[in-house]
Amino acid sequence: MNTAQLYEIYLQHPLIATDTRKILPNSLFFALRGANFNANLFAQEALAKGAAYVVVDDPAVVASERYLLVEHVLVALQQLANHHRRQLKIPFLAITGTNGKTTTKELVLAVLRKKFNTLATVGNLNNHIGVPLTLLSLTGAHEVAVVEMGANHIGDIRELCDIAEPNYGLITNIGQAHLEGFGSFEGVIRTKSELFDHLRQKNGVPIINARNEMLTNMGRRFANAHYYGLPGSTANAELLATDPYISYRDEEGNCHQTQLLGAYNFDNILAALCVGRIFGVPDALAHEAVAEYAPTNNRSQVMRGASNTLIADAYNANPSSMRAALESFARMPALHKVAILGDMFELGTYGPARHREVLDLVASLGINQALVCGQAFCAARNEADPMQFFATKEELAAWLVAHPPNNAYVLVKGSRGMGLESLLPGLLGE
């Protein structure tokens, strides 16, 4: 079955499923393969649970006309998404970057929804499967699409651009993350710049942080770039305070209070305000959207409990985001601060040096207490380090039961694989 034929069926059944546990009535089930699974084996189950058709690439499982045989299910999903995207004559904004892309995406979505029916990537469905699923959830009622793009290897962003074909693009920043997959920081730069390479080829519009030298250098290749963050740019504002939440003054002199903390989130706010200006969202509504947005899912999320105030930032960590979070935490006007840190994953051979740098940073910031967890941090420790080390999260959790912090600000940050979010209830005093 080719893409055009599959698209006609999709128009009749525009709900997509890739997990038999989440089958929707009359949906299309795509039987994806992975390193440890082959969903072709669950095609019959998907039909029994209500799927209208199943898309498979194993002829041996085809049992009726409700089995749609393609050469490769993932490729078929991606080509179907691209075909659907080409039918929609609306702006497509792609957002990528080392840090802050999900928060920026959510802020941009909040701003654009003040004027437009806008669809954005749900959660972090930002890879070669998630982006097609996002595109296929678009309907004729949507007026703008915001697509988050993540990457672990060189070429990932290029592949996602080929699928989504964005005509606007925003890179939040370029930092040290997934170095194991990229091979080097230069590999990170090369991959993130693939978005701007696509925009150049398609005469698209880049949206650039004017305060980031690396990004402004990339912007010199464009005559139609929009900038934010400096006087005279498309959007600018003045950071007033982070105590702990960000407050800022706009270009008209009006002050705004947000529910975001950390100076590192100010650039994400400016990016959203810039997008609002480009798309004609009235400034008052854009600032209102920023003020209303509250982060969730352990992304710089403030949680107040009976015992402590937590800054839950345990969704992910890399050297760049770890430094930004720690420096922001150190500036907060709290009497007692505790930093609980977990290993940073996917750094490859760069891991030992980068973990050592974080330990040196912690020691220099004057944070009252630091509890450090994970094999990588333990391997990087020196005898003179003032922080306490725990080889596993379980050891740390047991120690916290016996020595709970009280009346403290507590930063919890580590890579997703460390699972530090399981510590949050106990730290809150629940």
Image (tube, helix red, strand yellow):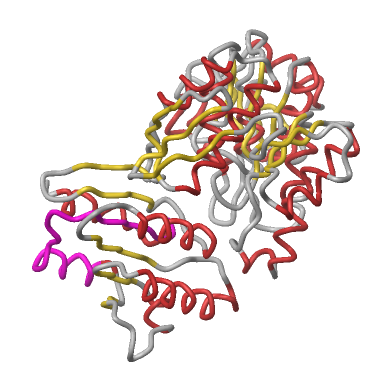
Q: Position of residue 68 (x, y in %)?
A: 69, 27
> Which residue is drawn at the image coordinates 74% and 55% (left, top)?
214
**Position of 194 relative to 44 (above/below):** below
Q: In which image quadrant can residue 203 be found?
A: top right
Residue 41 showing in the rendered view: no
Seen at 54% across and 55% down, the residue is 36
| Residue 87 x, y percent position in the rendering | 79, 16
Q: In which quadrant will I find the N terminus?
A: top right
Q: Is residue 29 above or below residue 127?
A: above
- The x and y percentages for residue 377 are 40, 77
Specify whether 164 is left or right of 18.
right
Q: Is residue 136 magenta?
A: no
Judging depth in this view, the residue of 200 and 76 nearest the camera is 200
Q: Which residues are magenta?
A: 394-416
Q: Nearer the viewer, residue 357 or 17?
A: 357
In magenta segment, residue 411? yes
Left or right: where 185 falls relative to 24: right
Residue at point 16%, 43% (across, down): 305
Is residue 113 shown to the viewer in this render?
Answer: yes
